[in-house]
Image (cartoon, rainbow, N blue to C red):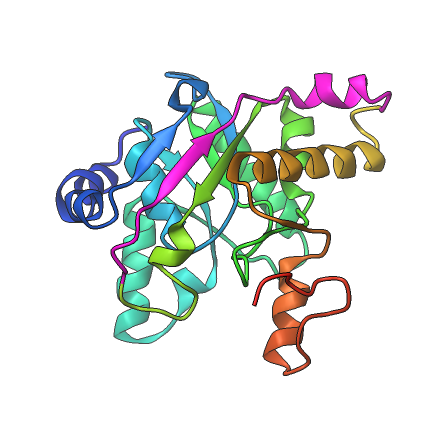
Amino acid sequence: MHNKWYWTFKYILFGPFLRVWNRPEIEGLENIPTKGSALLASSHQSVMDSFFFPLMCPRQITFPAKSEYFTTPGVVGRMQSWFFTSVGQVAVNRNEAGAAETMNKAAQKVFDRGDLFGVYPEGTRSPDGRIYRGRTGMARIALATGEKIIPVGMIGSRDANPIGSWLLRPKKVRMKVGKPIDPIAYVKEQGLEPDSQEAVRVLTDHVMHTLVELTGYEYVDMYASEVKKSLEAGHGYPRGAEPSFS
């Protein structure tokens, strides 16, 4: 896949500035195949993750994007829709029935082209920089298609672009790409059937703990969306998710 706007943003409009401002570095790039399909599973620290990693990856990546990005009214909404459409992102309504099937079909189309499909298994940005319990959509795609999962740890992107901030800070950003995980082989090694619900959860947890190893960030065995909901309601962190840092 070669989208002209994707490469224009990467090499002309955004990329050169990001390379100077945030000095991004990547380790383990050899773990991403130079051709053929694969499933990239990244930790999610900031909105800019979808810019920093594609900037450093030599191949184009297709990410699913919230359907709201394509349907928001007004001038800003139209500009947002044009941007995500022009760089080849896929709209997914995560709140509607059949969202998982829509995601699977979107991923399969990308794989059929021999391209890379990127997902954030946490489902949303981390509220505090730690790595949270993964949603199982990533594992379901991998086990249904047999595509290898390539873990990607984002480091420092939250410092460069904290939640709620509009101005990008001149903080260094790093990325670590782990070795590919064969989903079918892994669950069978655990004595599980690939089509079982237990296999989906075990594979998801394995990927999340791999991201912890890559980044060195603390793991929280709770969904980030639940923690965010509690914080936004003024209830603080749920029991068991309290951070050890101030």
Does residue 43 appear anywhere in the picture? yes
Q: Residue 174 falls in which quadrant of the image?
A: top left
The answer to whether residue 189 is left or right of residue 42 is: right
Query: Whole-percent x and y of residue 94?
Result: 59, 57
User: What's the magenta region?
Assistant: 168-192
Query: Whole-percent x and y of residue 153?
Result: 49, 38
- Whether residue 211 is in magenta: the answer is no
Query: Whole-percent x and y of residue 4?
Result: 20, 37
Q: Tell me which residue sits at (52%, 44%) in the image.
A: 43
Residue situated in front as seen by the camera: 190 or 22: 22
Q: Residue 207 falls in which quadrant of the image?
A: top right
- Whether residue 175 is in magenta: the answer is yes
Query: Whole-percent x and y of residue 158?
Result: 42, 56
Q: Tell me which residue sits at (69%, 33%) in the image.
A: 206
Q: Tell me which residue sits at (38%, 57%) in the image.
A: 159
Q: Residue 136 falls in which quadrant of the image?
A: top right
As displayed, is residue 234 above or below residue 127? below
Q: Tell me which residue sits at (44%, 29%) in the image.
A: 116
Q: Residue furthest left?
A: 12
As displayed, is residue 11 above or below residue 239? above
Q: Quadrant of the N terminus?
A: top left
Residue situated in front as seen by the camera: 224 or 93: 224
